[in-house]
């Protein structure tokens, strides 16, 4: 195997995560795709058990996938740069070296999330790494394909990542390519936002009608993105669909009502931008509305960030415990939410806070799931340090099953306080 690894001729390009989120003013298309016929929750399995073969994988001991065809007709006219985004699940702890080849290009390696402690492969995670690639690796039109690989070196001889989606992001020169434009008309920079906020935009089409407007925000919130960065432009993807953003308007006038009742209190100003998308999926991201603040009349929200996150957080191996701190006055607390992403939560066996069970189970088996569980009984919380524990998955019919994987940064806690004293 070592001889095979060294004998393969690869140009190994280690790329940083550049432009992970398109900034305001950018013009781009996202060609998104996921493997609808894939197993493991419609995912691509990259890697494999030593000695096993699979029809989706190449001949080189399963560590390099067979080519997969992209269904898109790529527009490269006026293209100035290109990125590849993958929806990556660590899956088997210890797996490293995820890389992609477009057509017959060099191999490009995806970076690890820098906010996950190194070595990141010891922690379960679901992230969205981005790499910059030359536009020239793609062919205009159809007939583009890709292959994925992982490093065959693995502590228990079964490296594997799962890929829920592969996205090609092509950027264009907004000075030369006709495109939709527009600006947010509500709110205005400097506004104070209440519990409900109307978001509206004045879009202008170029050659094609406007299809949709997606609103995204820069603020501190739960980290569904899985990279451990709590303040960022918040959104992520599942099976190539944009999720966990502020909202989308799909018909004129493309307005969205944003409910901020579970958005954490903010130490820094918020920003909001809109993505104006025409019928050809050409997308223009508006300039941001800045210097926004929260001014809610009924309550406040504390984000309790977990720490002491266990490595290899898979519930079949036993109970796993994290810590979090509560700083607010619990006498005014009215509700809480547990927020996390997982894989195969159908095998979870309860969540305990400070030793008291607060939740049992939800979600599918052998699939990705994004949780937001509301608690109204808060008697188990305490001021200062708290612990949260996931129960051990029992055997089913006498056999060991998969268990739930809890992804980085662990299970986050939101606590809602009534500031009116009612």
Image: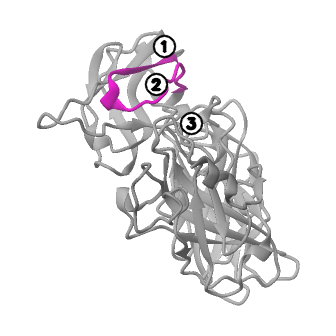
Q: Earlier in the sequence, mark 2 or mark 1?
A: 1
396 lies left or right of 191: left
Residue 422 in view: no
Q: Residue furthest right?
A: 175
Residue contact between numbered discs 2 and 1, judged by CB atoms under 8 Å: yes
Residue in front for this viewpoint, 174 or 366: 366
120 lies left or right of 178: left
The x and y percentages for residue 41 are: 36, 57
Q: Nearer the viewer, mark 3 or mark 2?
A: 3
Q: Secondary structure at mark 1?
A: loop
Residue in front for this viewpoint, 94 or 301: 94
Residue 124 falls inside the magenta stretch: no
The x and y percentages for residue 105 are: 73, 70
Query: From which residue to which does the magenta span run?
Result: 303-325
Where does the C terminus fall, quadrant-wise? Answer: top left
Q: Residue at x 31, y 37 (%)?
A: 403
Q: To which residue does mark 3 refer? A: 121
Q: Is residue 160 above or below residue 198?
A: above
Which of the labelled discs sits on residue 329, or is there none? Answer: 1
Distance from Cα at disc 3 to Cα at disc 2: 37 Å
Q: Residues within 10 Å of mark 3 (few under 14, many from 20)?
A: some
Distance from Cα at disc 2 to Cα at disc 1: 8 Å
Q: Residues within 10 Å of mark 1 (few under 14, many from 20)?
A: few
Which of the labelled discs sits on residue 417, or is there none? Answer: 2
Q: Residue at x 52, y 62 (%)?
A: 165
């Amino acid at each position: 195997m070592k001889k095979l690894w060294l004998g393969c001729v690869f140009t190994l390009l280690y790329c940083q995560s550049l432009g992970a989120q398109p900034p305001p003013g950018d013009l781009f298309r996202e060609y998104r795709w996921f493997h609808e016929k894939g197993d493991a929750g419609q995912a691509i399995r990259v890697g494999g058990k030593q000695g096993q073969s699979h029809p989706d994988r190449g001949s080189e001991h399963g560590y390099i996938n067979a080519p997969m065809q992209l269904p898109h007709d790529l527009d490269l006219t006026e293209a100035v740069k290109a990125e590849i985004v993958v929806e990556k699940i660590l899956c088997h702890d210890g797996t490293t070296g995820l890389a992609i080849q477009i057509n017959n290009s060099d191999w490009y390696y995806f970076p690890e999330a820098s906010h996950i402690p190194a070595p990141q492969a010891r922690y379960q995670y679901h992230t969205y790494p981005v790499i910059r690639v030359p536009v020239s690796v793609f062919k205009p039109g159809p007939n583009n394909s890709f292959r994925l690989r992982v490093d065959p070196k693995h502590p228990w001889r079964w490296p594997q990542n799962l890929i829920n989606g592969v996205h090609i992001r092509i950027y264009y020169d907004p000075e030369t390519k006709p495109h939709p434009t527009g600006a947010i008309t509500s709110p205005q920079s400097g506004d104070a936002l209440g519990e409900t906020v109307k978001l509206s935009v004045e879009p202008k089409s170029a050659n094609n009608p406007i299809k949709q407007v997606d609103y995204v925000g820069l603020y501190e919130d739960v980290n569904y993105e899985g990279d451990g960065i709590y303040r960022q432009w918040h959104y992520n993807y599942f099976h190539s669909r944009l999720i966990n953003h502020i909202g989308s308007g799909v018909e004129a006038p493309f307005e969205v009502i944003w409910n901020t009742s579970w958005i954490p209190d903010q130490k820094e100003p918020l920003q909001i931008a809109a993505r104006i998308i025409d019928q050809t999926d050409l997308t223009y991201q508006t300039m941001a509305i800045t210097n926004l603040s929260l001014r809610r009349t009924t309550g406040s929200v504390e984000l309790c960030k977990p720490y002491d996150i266990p490595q290899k957080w898979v519930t079949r191996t036993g109970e796993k415990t994290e810590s979090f701190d509560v700083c607010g006055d619990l006498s005014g607390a009215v509700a809480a939410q547990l927020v996390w992403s997982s894989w195969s939560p159908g095998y979870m066996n309860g969540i305990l806070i400070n030793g008291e069970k607060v939740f049992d189970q939800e979600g599918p088996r052998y699939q990705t799931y994004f949780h937001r569980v509301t608690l109204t009984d808060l008697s188990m919380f305490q001021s200062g340090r708290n612990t949260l524990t996931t129960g051990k998955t029992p055997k089913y019919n006498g056999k060991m099953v998969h268990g739930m994987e809890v992804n980085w940064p662990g299970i986050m806690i939101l606590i809602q306080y009534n500031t009116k004293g009612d």
